Amino acid sequence: MKKIKNLLIKKNKTKIVCLTAYSKNIAQEIDNFVDIILVGDSLGSVLYDFNTTRSVTLEMMINHSKSVRKGITKSLMVVDMPYNTYRNKSEALKNCKKVTKETKCDAVKLEGGNKKIVEIIKHLIKNKIPVMGHIGLLPQNEKGKFTFKGKSSKEKLRLLNEAKVLERAGVFAIVLECVEKKLSKEITDQIKIITIGIGASQHCDGQILVTDDLIGLTNSKIKFVKEFGNVRKTIRDAVKKYKTEVKSLKYPSKKYLY
Ligand code: KIV
């Protein structure tokens, strides 16, 4: 696929810029500035206030992705497969086919790098579904407090091995979430496909953030999140002005009447 090939040639040349979107309006605004738009299952916590992404359904992902699709003209669109939709090869293929057909996305993302998930990913790729991997912190499987990965040498070795196995399985990119700095460099240096970091250092081939966090809509306290804007303030200011004008009968003025 041309869009994926164009991304892969950016490795070691220029950083790859990725963001999430859950709706057409956001996708439309970010499309010109990014390489990849991910419809992340983070929408479960960001939009629906779920405690875990495990509550996100396939239907939610499809509906939001259909909206996002309408806002994209150039970026590669990737859709997260939600929890319990890829437990075995046939379930994964059935659901990924449904997602790609209904949302017209370019690829899907699946969490994990163990033997079982790698077999499922191979099956998807054999059936012409492009896959992005995701290792390190796996929100769909995390129990307890979220912490960074790659502390012990055993964990380092496991993650490095998972990245290599995923590369051999045929994924075109791997998200490294909350992966220790030196390890994220080692992984990035040792594989030919692209690594996309989130809390995983500047050594990755690209970076991703949740757009709602970056624009300052969520008031996120996560260590790796940097707010590049303050949309909460913009909303408050606009709503205050609206309220004042409604109360004072300034709005709707003549210009807005039929
Ligand atoms: O669900 C999501 O938004 C993600 C990214 C943050 C990598 O998986």
Image: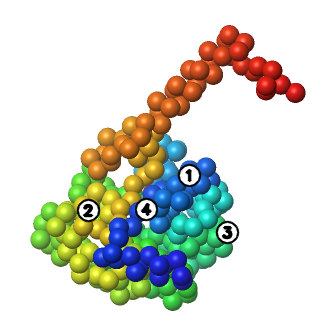
Q: Is residue 25 above or below residue 99?
A: above
Circle number at residue 29: 1
**Are the residues flagged by discs 2 and 4 in contact, CB closer than 8 Å?**
no
Work out whether residue 184 or residue 237 is closer to the camera in this orientation and state it. 237
* Type of colouring: rainbow
Helix, strand or loop at label 3? It is: helix
Callout 2 crowding tier (Cα within 10 Å): few <14, some 14–19, many ≥20: some
Q: State the quadrant of the C terminus.
A: top right
Report, in whole angstroms, how far the alpha carbon at label 1 lies from the one at label 2: 25 Å
Residue located 61% across and 49% down the image: 25
Q: Amino acid at mark 1?
A: Glu
Residue positioned most to the front: 255
Report, in whole angstroms, how far the alpha carbon at label 1 lies from the one at label 3: 23 Å
**Ligand 1 under 8 Å from disc 4 Cβ:** no
The residue carrying mark 2 is 202
**What is the number of callouts on the image?**
4
The residue carrying mark 3 is 102
Question: In which image quadrant can residue 72 be found?
Answer: bottom right
Mark 3 or mark 2, earlier in chain: 3
Q: Estimate the x, y position of residue 71 in percent, counting from the top left.
A: 62, 58
Q: State the quadrant of the N terminus.
A: bottom right
Callout 1 crowding tier (Cα within 10 Å): few <14, some 14–19, many ≥20: few
Q: Amino acid at mark 2?
A: Gln
Residue located 43% across and 62% down the image: 18
Circle number at residue 18: 4
Residue positioned most to the left: 153
Residue located 12% across and 66% down the image: 152
